[in-house]
């Protein structure tokens, strides 16, 4: 099958790639652009490990085709830190041990960053329901929820 | 000097909560997991799997697949070693079917091509002709006369005469005279319990990247809990010399026991050998469910006798486990763990390992134990209810402690069950009021823990920092624990130590990260390796000062003169010794190799409040407290994490998770949508209490903590739900439909 040419922006950089129309955005990010931060846990949109934002909207990159990225702005876990400076969420996840194996962490960070941009003062229930599409099998979510709540509080104070 | 760092108090680093060394990589997306590796010229592979539960393979035609654009190799069973026996044969048969497909999802062929899409297309073009055979997927049905025989001659000598050929192993243990014990009881309850198979549910599917040449030399990158085991098994299945295959463990995205064996690695290597190119092979989630190793399902009968004062007079259990189409269901662990928390005069436990047309089971966090606790602790709960006894006091009255005889034989050394029960009783959760519709359950749980073959190597750098190489993949923060233990011995800051998971070519043999053994065994070896380095550091100081080696001791990262020489020389800091080590005798390293056998067992007590919606049958866990003996918590935050993670997995097992097979023997819910593991909105915060009863078998008193945390939840939740619903729940998972059925039958009865 012939490939299609796509131009898009990933973490602020313009990128071009050729892809089979059947390839998902996740396939493209990982196999064509070398950005392996987003993970494939299921390929069916159930686990959230592949979470990225597309034009600011949180999506499972395994449910979107690579060709649909044409003209869009994609943000992945690789773009969360600024230079040497980790995002407050990243720092709190380390401090709270909000990860054990770490495979779900990129998706959860992308999802929670997206939450805090929309709602800087979420309740515990709101965090839990927002993250209901991001499976974590190691932690029981306790430390993740605490890390998110504390980050939100700290970011509110700083702003 | 004879150095011994053993201590259980007065720690400087152990017991603190520093950031994990791999944290930065894991929050930035830099950490490389199984599927994140690439190699020049790499091919992608896909596996052709049986759609039938049981079928003879009549013909495999790969002509069309091989003719497709970009296809470089196809392998079938003919491309693997012949003449294997024992477990190697079982694993090969599971990795690639021989003449019969034994379960839905069983691999029958594989293909490698220049892209993942081409590989998938080519896989679909492989034609397989089957003769469908009768199948059985239920453990009780597989034992019935007339059940389809999965494999003749698979039973070992333990199986008594007259049982169905699907019963392949048998276990019986205990002591005393159970019938005499039951005669002494004021109340005897006997009940039947069923649990469904669950999956470990790690978020990272199995993934590997392999290169193997016709010269018999290979390299393999994979997500595994034990790369020396992968090396050994792959070498056997491919007819290689073990040492010629170098295996590197990637970061591992969860395992919980499910990555203790191999499924796809030998296939990638076989394809690579045939194509003469690196081959990447990654399972889909459906493949993970169908063709990796879920748990056993069980059918259990438990009978316990009690006096009105709560004394257990006798206990008996029969535990039937199916482990798929191969021997290995952990029924002896189920039997041995069942009554371990209790000091019993009369006890008997029996286990059956039964073949079915399901995937070969793999370990899942304390394999076999959670199901046993579900059955036993449910019966104890019912006895307490009927006799109006407090469930914790009753357990305390019968609790195993140092010197009592375990239900499976040995006398207990120092153990911490009583301490967890007392801490649970003292916890505010135990006496907190319950809202209407809620019930509270408690349960104890037990796991053996394990030592196992272990090698650790430590090397000092010239600036006084240290690197440790361990061989047990880090599945939950163990690099932090190793660095803390090494810091404690070396007396240098935690941050000055880097712990690496060494590949098979860089360190001696290490058993898998299983049996809650890593912090115990690799930790012990790290301490011993650090002690060896300290001994050499002291020797260099002694030589410099011109005093005997045994007149030097080590404190706070410095060599100091002792005895008659005390005060004669200024303390010599580690960095000053290592700066000149090349000129004073060469590199300073420490290493340790052993099979430590003092892994202390671990007990836990859990308290759960559950709320049952009588209209929908759905259950919400509203409060959860884990109390567990850690011996010594090296990094308490990660110990809490193990407690919480085990509880959460137990909640899933108790309430939602199950393998559902259709009449056709095919798995009906091979995805996270239909096999629903707990999501964030399902769970409450999970409170933890770390009890520390030191393990005499570890220099710092460490006990493994990873597995015990999943032993009590099934029973604790079942007891809570039974209390809330007012009806005893005997089958897991307690999904809404099952609760509604139980409520209906209670109303009818």
Image (cartoon, helix red, strand yellow):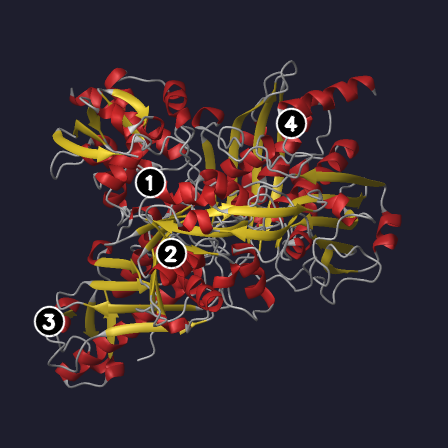
Mark 1 Cα shell of 10 Å, populated few (<14), some (14-19), many (≥20): many
Q: Chain of mark 4?
A: B
> Is the N terminus of chain A in the top left, top right, bottom left or bottom right quadrant?
top left
Q: Which numbered disc, 3 or 2, marks the residue that appears first in the sequence?
A: 2
Please name the residue that numbered disc 1 is placed on: A97
Report, in whole angstroms, how far the alpha carbon at label 1 lies from the one at label 2. 18 Å
Q: Which numbered disc, 2 or 4, marks the residue that appears first in the sequence?
A: 2
Determine whether label 1 and label 2 are within 8 Å by CB.
Answer: no
Q: Chain of mark 2?
A: B
Please name the residue that numbered disc 3 is placed on: B579
Report, in whole angstroms, how far the alpha carbon at label 2 lies from the one at label 4. 37 Å
User: What x and y, as percent, mark residue B494?
Assistant: 24, 55
Please name the residue that numbered disc 4 is placed on: B721
Secondary structure state at the residue bearing disc 3: helix
Q: Residue at the spot x=18%, y=79% of the render?
A: B540
Is residue B394 in sight in this rendering? Answer: no
Closer to the eye: label 1 or 2: 2
The label on residue B473 is 2
In the image, are marks 3 and 2 on the same chain? yes
Q: Quadrant of residue B212?
A: bottom left
Depth order, front residue of B574/B324: B324
């Amino acid at each position: 099958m012939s490939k299609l040419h796509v131009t898009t922006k990933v973490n602020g950089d313009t990128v071009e790639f050729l892809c089979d129309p059947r390839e998902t955005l996740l396939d493209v990010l990982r196999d064509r652009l070398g950005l392996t931060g987003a993970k494939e846990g299921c390929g069916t949109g159930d686990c959230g490990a592949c979470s990225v934002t597309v034009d600011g909207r949180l999506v499972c990159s395994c449910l979107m085709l690579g060709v649909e990225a044409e003209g869009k702005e994609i943000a992945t876990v690789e773009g969360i830190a600024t230079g040497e400076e980790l995002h407050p969420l990243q720092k709190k996840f380390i401090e709270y041990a909000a990860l054990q194996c770490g495979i779900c962490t990129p998706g959860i960070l992308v999802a929670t960053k997206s939450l805090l941009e929309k709602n800087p003062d979420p309740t515990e229930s709101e965090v839990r329901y927002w993250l209901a599409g991001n499976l974590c099998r190691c932690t029981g979510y306790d430390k993740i929820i605490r890390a998110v709540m504390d980050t939100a509080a700290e970011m509110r104070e700083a702003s | 000097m004879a150095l011994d760092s053993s201590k259980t108090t007065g720690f400087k680093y152990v017991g603190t909560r520093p950031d994990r060394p791999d944290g930065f990589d894991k929050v930035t997306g830099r950490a490389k997991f199984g599927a994140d590796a690439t190699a020049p010229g790499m091919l992608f592979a896909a596996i052709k799997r049986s759609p039938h539960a049981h079928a003879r393979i009549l013909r495999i035609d790969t002509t069309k697949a091989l003719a497709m654009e970009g296809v470089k190799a196809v392998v079938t069973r003919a491309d693997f070693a012949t003449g294997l026996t024992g477990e190697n044969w079982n694993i090969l048969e599971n990795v690639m079917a021989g003449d019969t497909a034994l379960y839905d999802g069983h691999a029958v062929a594989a293909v490698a091509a220049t892209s993942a899409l081409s590989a998938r297309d080519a896989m679909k073009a492989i034609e397989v002709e089957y003769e469908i055979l009768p199948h059985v997927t239920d453990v009780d049905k597989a034992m019935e006369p007339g059940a389809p025989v999965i494999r003749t001659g698979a039973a070992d000598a333990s199986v008594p005469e007259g049982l169905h050929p699907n019963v392949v192993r048998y276990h019986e243990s205990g002591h005393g005279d159970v019938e005499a014990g039951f005669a002494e009881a004021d109340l005897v309850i006997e009940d039947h319990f069923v649990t469904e198979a669950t999956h470990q549910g790690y978020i990272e599917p199995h993934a590997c990247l392999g290169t193997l040449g016709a010269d018999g030399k290979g390299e393999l990158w994979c997500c595994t809990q034990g790369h020396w085991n992968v090396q050994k098994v792959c070498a056997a299945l491919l007819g290689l010399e073990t040492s010629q295959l170098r295996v590197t463990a990637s970061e591992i995205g969860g395992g919980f026991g499910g990555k203790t064996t191999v499924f796809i690695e030998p296939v990638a290597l076989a394809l690579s050998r045939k194509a003469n190119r690196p081959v990447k092979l990654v399972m889909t989630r459906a493949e993970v469910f169908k063709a990796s190793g879920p748990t056993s399902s069980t059918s259990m009968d438990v009978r316990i006798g009690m006096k009105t004062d709560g004394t257990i007079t006798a206990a008996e259990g029969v535990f039937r486990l199916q482990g798929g189409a191969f021997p290995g269901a952990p029924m002896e662990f189920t039997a041995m763990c069942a009554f371990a928390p209790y000091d019993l005069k009369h006890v008997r436990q029996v286990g059956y390992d039964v073949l079915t047309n399901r995937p070969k089971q793999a370990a899942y966090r304390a394999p076999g134990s959670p199901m046993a606790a579900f059955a036993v602790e449910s019966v104890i709960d019912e006895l307490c209810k009927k006799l109006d006894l407090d469930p914790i006091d009753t357990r305390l009255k019968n609790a195993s402690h140092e010197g009592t005889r375990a239900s499976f034989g040995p006398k207990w050394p120092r153990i911490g069950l009583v301490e967890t029960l007392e801490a649970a009783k003292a916890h505010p959760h135990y006496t907190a009021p319950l809202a209407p519709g809620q019930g509270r359950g408690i349960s104890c749980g037990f796991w053996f823990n394990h030592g196992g073959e272990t090698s650790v190597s430590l090397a000092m750098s010239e600036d006084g920092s240290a690197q440790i190489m361990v061989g047990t993949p880090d599945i939950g923060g163990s690099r932090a624990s190793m660095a803390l233990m090494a810091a404690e011995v070396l007396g240098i800051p935690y941050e000055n130590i880097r712990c690496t998971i060494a590949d098979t070519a860089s360190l001696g043999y290490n058993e898998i990260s299983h049996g809650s053994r890593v912090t115990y065994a690799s930790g012990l070896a790290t301490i011993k390796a650090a002690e060896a380095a300290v001994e050499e550091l002291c020797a260099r100081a002694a030589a410099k000062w011109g005093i005997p080696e045994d007149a030097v001791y080590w404190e706070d990262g410095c060599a100091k003169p002792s005895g008659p020489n005390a005060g004669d020389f200024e303390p010599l800091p580690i960095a000053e010794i290592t700066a000149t080590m090349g000129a004073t005798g060469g590199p300073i390293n420490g290493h340790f190799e052993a099979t430590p056998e003092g892994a202390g067992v671990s007990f836990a007590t859990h308290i759960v409040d559950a709320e049952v919606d009588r209209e929908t049958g759905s259950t919400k866990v509203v409060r959860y407290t884990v109390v567990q003996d850690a011996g010594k918590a090296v990094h308490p935050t990660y110990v809490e994490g193990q407690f919480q993670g085990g509880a959460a997995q137990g909640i899933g097992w108790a309430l939602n998770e199950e393998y559902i097979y259709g009449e056709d023997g095919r798995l009906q819910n091979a995805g996270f949508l239909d096999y629903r593991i707990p999501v964030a909105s399902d769970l409450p915060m999970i409170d933890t209490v770390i009890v520390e009863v030191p393990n005499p078998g570890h220099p710092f008193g460490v006990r493994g903590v990873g597995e015990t945390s999943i032993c009590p939840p099934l029973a604790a939740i079942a007891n809570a739900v039974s209390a809330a619903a007012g009806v005893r729940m005997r089958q897991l998972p307690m999904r809404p439909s099952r609760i509604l059925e139980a409520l209906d039958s209670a109303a009818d009865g």
